[in-house]
């Protein structure tokens, strides 16, 4: 008997059109890429959360070059869930592309294997796609701490552990990019740009902002019809293991992010605008977070605010050093054609 639930009826397939002319009763394929058998319990939780969604969908699980995990997943899921091997480059991008580029659904959604979608996640994403000019959407990502959140961890660095920055409202709003931990994209647009770059992606624990790069590339190709939205009502919880709740992890992740963003800019078709959001973040969000932490410590006579402010400065410093490393020693080739190599 399957550990992941019973079969689910699927919606019919409407005729596929351009990104702006898809019928309202659009079909959806959800893709979960996994690679590590040690995360089995998280994979099971992710799959169950998708199968519990109230919007009809297909579900495809892509196993990234791990034959033991492939056989385990294949033996655990019901027959209506597709389980396939990554047939492209090793890593998250190749795994997601394996399923999404071959999909016949109108919309493709991505969920990380260590994330769990809350009720209404899929329906909220689909409804946001009905807006004119929208080519993709993303949802709010909450941190699911394995242990209590460290007192020194600031919400301004939520992205370090794969979570959205706190403070967004309740209604959908336009953004430069969303994250592949909770993403939906028009399948035609995704296939038009050949999906995620497979030479610039997460492999194991080595992170790259391939989701941001994809959003920028699609927006460049589609122009006004290539808008991305953040949908706060589409909520997932992203697991944060204990080893990520350390200062060492924060420093390493910030260094990697700074390094990756500079390399991403070198690949961007819109070189000058590629890091606009990062400049706003550094000039507004970071000073505000440091100030709030310092004032809180003075007002409450508690070290917690100062600890969070110090963590922010430490993380920003690591990101700057990572960016400098990429600027000085990184590849100089700039691919501006709007498609991956």
Image (tube, rainbow, N blue to C red):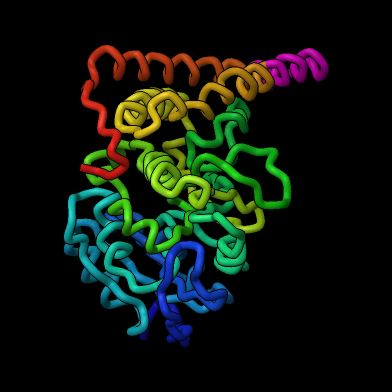
Q: Is residue 303 visible?
A: no
Q: Quadrant of the C terminus?
A: top left
The structure residue drawn at horizontal position 36% and vertical position 83%, both measured from the top left corner, is 80
- Residue 136 relative to residue 262: left or right: right
Query: Residue 202 appears at what percent x and percent y?
Result: 30, 42
> In the displayed structure, would residue 227 be above or below residue 54?
above
- Residue 181 relative to residue 200: left or right: right
Q: Is residue 308 magenta?
A: no
Front in this rendered view, residue 46 or 138: 138
Question: Which picture quadrant has residue 321?
Answer: top left
The structure residue drawn at horizontal position 53% and vertical position 54%, both measured from the top left corner, is 137
Query: Residue 162 appears at what percent x and percent y?
Result: 48, 42
Residue farthest to the right, as pictured:
299
Q: Is residue 300 magenta?
A: yes
Query: Residue 293 appears at what percent x and percent y?
Result: 70, 20
In the image, the segment drawn in magenta is: 291-307
**Chief SS of the magenta region:** helix
The structure residue drawn at horizontal position 57% and vertical position 53%, both measured from the top left corner, is 139
> In the displayed structure, would residue 65 be above or below residue 143?
below
Front in this rendered view, residue 147 or 68: 68
Query: Residue 11 appears at what percent x and percent y?
Result: 48, 83
- All told, the count of numbered labels is 0
Q: Quadrant of the N terminus?
A: bottom left
Q: Is residue 95 visible?
A: yes
The structure residue drawn at horizontal position 47% and vertical position 24%, both measured from the top left corner, is 247
- Residue 137 relative to residue 4: left or right: right
């Amino acid at each position: 008997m399957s550990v992941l639930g019973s079969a689910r009826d699927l919606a019919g397939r409407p005729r596929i059109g351009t990104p702006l002319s898809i019928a309202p009763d659009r079909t959806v394929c959800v893709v979960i890429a996994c690679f590590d058998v040690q995360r089995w319990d998280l994979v099971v939780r992710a799959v169950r959360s998708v199968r519990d969604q109230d919007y009809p969908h297909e579900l495809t699980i892509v196993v990234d070059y791990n034959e033991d995990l492939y056989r385990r997943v294949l033996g655990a899921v019901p027959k209506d869930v597709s389980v396939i091997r990554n047939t492209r480059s090793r890593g998250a991008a190749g795994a997601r592309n394996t399923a999404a580029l071959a999909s016949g659904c109108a919309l493709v959604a991505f969920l990380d294997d260590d994330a769990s979608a809350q009720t209404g996640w899929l329906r909220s994403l689909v409804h946001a796609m009905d807006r004119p000019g929208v080519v993709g959407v993303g949802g709010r990502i909450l941190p699911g701490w394995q242990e209590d959140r460290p007192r020194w961890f600031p919400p301004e660095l939520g992205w370090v552990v794969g979570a959205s920055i706190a403070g967004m409202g309740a209604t959908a709003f336009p953004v430069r990019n969303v994250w592949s931990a909770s993403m939906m994209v028009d399948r035609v647009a995704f296939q038009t740009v050949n999906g995620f770059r497979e030479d610039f992606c997460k492999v194991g624990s080595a992170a790259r902002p391939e989701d941001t790069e994809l959003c920028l590339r699609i927006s460049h190709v589609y122009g006004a019809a290539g808008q991305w939205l953040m949908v706060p009502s589409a909520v997932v919880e992203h697991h944060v293991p204990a080893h990520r709740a350390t200062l060492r992890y924060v420093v390493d992740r910030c260094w990697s992010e700074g390094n990756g963003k500079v390399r991403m800019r070198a690949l961007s078709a819109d070189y000058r605008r590629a890091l606009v959001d990062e400049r706003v973040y550094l000039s507004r969000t970071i000073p505000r977070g440091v100030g709030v932490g310092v004032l809180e410590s003075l007002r409450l006579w508690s070290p917690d605010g100062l600890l969070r402010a110090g963590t922010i400065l430490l993380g920003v410093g690591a990101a700057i050093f990572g960016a400098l490393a990429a600027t000085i020693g990184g590849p100089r080739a700039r691919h501006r054609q709007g498609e991956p190599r």
